[in-house]
Amino acid sequence: MTALRWHKSSYSANTGPQCVEVAETRCSARVRDTQHRHLGHLEFPTGEWQVFLGTLRGEAEGAD
């Protein structure tokens, strides 16, 4: 198994360690709190993650 490559989310504020990290694979996206890595992560299927990001960007169907 290949080690995950975590990176700071571009949606996290530039306020130091209070951010969210994301590791994306072919099948999923994993999200964790930088300060509480020991608590694990949330995992989302790639399609759901893409819809979520599209919503943040205002690309969702019917978005203003």
Image: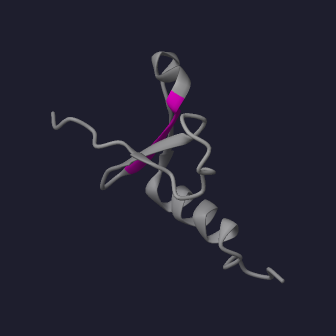
Q: Is residue 23 left or right of residue 39?
A: left
Residue 56 location (% of width, % of height): 68, 66
Which residue lies most toward the left here?
1
Which residue range is magenta in the image?
28-34
Which residue lies most toward the right here?
64
Which residue lies most toward the top here?
38
Q: Residue at x 47, y 42 (%)?
A: 21
Residue 38 location (% of width, % of height): 46, 16
Residue 15 location (% of width, % of height): 62, 44
Residue closest to the eye, 25 or 32: 32
Name the main secondary structure of what is drawn in magenta: strand
Q: In the figure, 13 relative to 62: above or below?
A: above
- Image quarter for residue 6? top left
Q: Is residue 53 left or right of residue 29?
A: right
Q: Residue at x 15, y 33 (%)?
A: 1
Q: Is residue 4 left or right of residue 31?
A: left
Q: Residue at x 45, y 57 (%)?
A: 46
Q: In the figure, 36 relative to 34: above or below?
A: above
Residue closest to the eye, 57 or 29: 57
Q: Is residue 33 magenta?
A: yes
Colour mode of the rendering: one colour
Q: Residue at x 84, y 83 (%)?
A: 64
Q: Is residue 64 magenta?
A: no
Numbered disc total: 0
Q: In the figure, 57 relative to 4: above or below?
A: below
Residue 27 location (% of width, % of height): 35, 52
